[in-house]
Image (tube, rainbow, N blue to C red):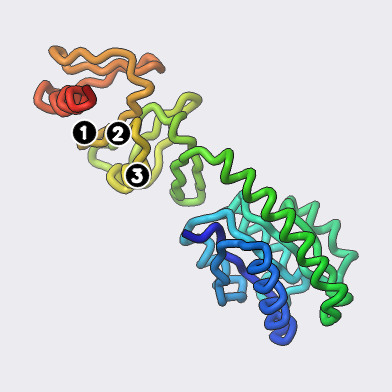
């Protein structure tokens, strides 16, 4: 399994190919488990990022002479990959403040001044990649399982442990997700959401619900009522709630 995808977006072909060679050589030297994505045009990069995954690594030319520049591309990347590593590769040091005011939270900057001087350029790439490797390791250590959903313009990333239950909205292709802090209505089928609720504490056998068993307080099998720790009481038919009784029996 790869740790991350790597994107190199530069509209100057000679420079892009040189960056590909230098960056991939250093990624190999530092033992990154990565996939170099061949696309570099902003629309193609964003299409690939929308497919999910991350955090990924992005090397962006600030002065990208396309429909949007590198800073604008980084802002759009942040909508889909909030934890990704953005590295600006540029000759325009005067534009660095613009990357900060755009709130793209770059991991680093690499100057193109000595781009074709390996002795000077490679150490700059190494320095940035060492920072990325350290932060990636910390992210992976602290990573908790999450549910990530895009619903219209909304991108939700919720820790599984904070989800109390998910409920299918009857007659609509929407689902209500109830968490420890608030609830969300998303335009997603419950079965699609259940595919991400694979942690051991979710019970997904009810047609209209996914329950986080860590948040169940009591179950009344005779009345068909499950009480959750946020004071919600969920009602089921006796035939339906038997599925939960059978699950508990298999758990010993």
Distance Cα–Cα, label 3 vs label 1? 13 Å
Q: What is the secondary structure assignment of the residue under circle 2?
A: strand
Q: Which mark is residue 206?
A: 1
Quadrant assignment, res 124: bottom right
User: Is 95 placed above or below 207 here?
Assistant: below
Q: Which mark is residue 210?
A: 2
Question: Residue at image x 77%, y 73%?
Answer: 63
Q: Which mark is residue 193?
A: 3
Q: How many marks?
A: 3
Q: What is the secondary structure assignment of the residue under circle 1?
A: loop
Q: Position of residue 153 (x, y in %)?
A: 51, 50
Disc 1 crowd rating (10 Å Cα; few below 14, some 14-19, many 20+) is some
User: Is 53 placed above or below 10 here?
Assistant: above
Q: What is the secondary structure assignment of the residue under circle 3?
A: helix
Question: Residue at image x 70%, y 69%?
Answer: 26
Residue 182 is left or right of residue 248, and the answer is right
Q: Nearer the viewer, residue 187 or 249?
A: 249
User: Is 190 placed above or below 234 here?
Assistant: below
Residue 118 is left or right of residue 61, and the answer is right
Residue 243, visible in the rendered structure? yes
Discs 2, 3 touching: Cβ within 8 Å: yes
Q: Which mark is residue 43?
A: none
Discs 1, 2 touching: Cβ within 8 Å: yes
């Amino acid at each position: 399994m790869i740790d991350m995808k790597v994107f190199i977006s530069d509209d100057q072909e000679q420079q892009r190919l040189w960056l590909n060679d230098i960056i991939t050589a250093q990624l190999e030297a530092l033992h990154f488990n990565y996939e170099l994505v061949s696309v570099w045009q902003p629309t193609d990069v964003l299409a690939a990022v929308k497919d999910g995954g991350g955090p990924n690594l992005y090397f962006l030319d600030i002065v990208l002479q396309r429909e949007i520049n590198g800073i604008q591309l980084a802002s759009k990347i942040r909508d889909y990959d909030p934890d990704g590593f953005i590295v600006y590769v540029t000759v325009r040091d005067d534009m660095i403040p613009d990357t900060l005011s755009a709130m793209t939270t770059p991991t680093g900057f690499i100057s193109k001044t000595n781009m074709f001087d390996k002795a000077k350029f490679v150490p700059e790439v190494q320095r940035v990649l060492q920072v990325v490797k350290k932060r990636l390791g910390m992210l992976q250590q602290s990573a908790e399982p999450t549910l990530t959903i895009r619903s219209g313009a909304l991108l939700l990333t919720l820790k599984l442990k904070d989800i109390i239950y998910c409920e299918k909205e009857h007659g609509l292709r929407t689902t209500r997700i109830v968490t420890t802090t608030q609830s969300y209505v998303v335009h997603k089928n419950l079965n699609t959401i259940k595919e991400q609720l694979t942690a051991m504490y979710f019970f997904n056998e009810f047609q209209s619900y996914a329950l986080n068993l860590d948040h169940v307080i009591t179950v009344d099998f005779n009345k068909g009522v499950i009480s959750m720790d946020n004071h919600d009481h969920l009602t089921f038919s006796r035939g339906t709630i038997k599925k939960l009784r059978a699950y508990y029996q298999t758990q010993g």
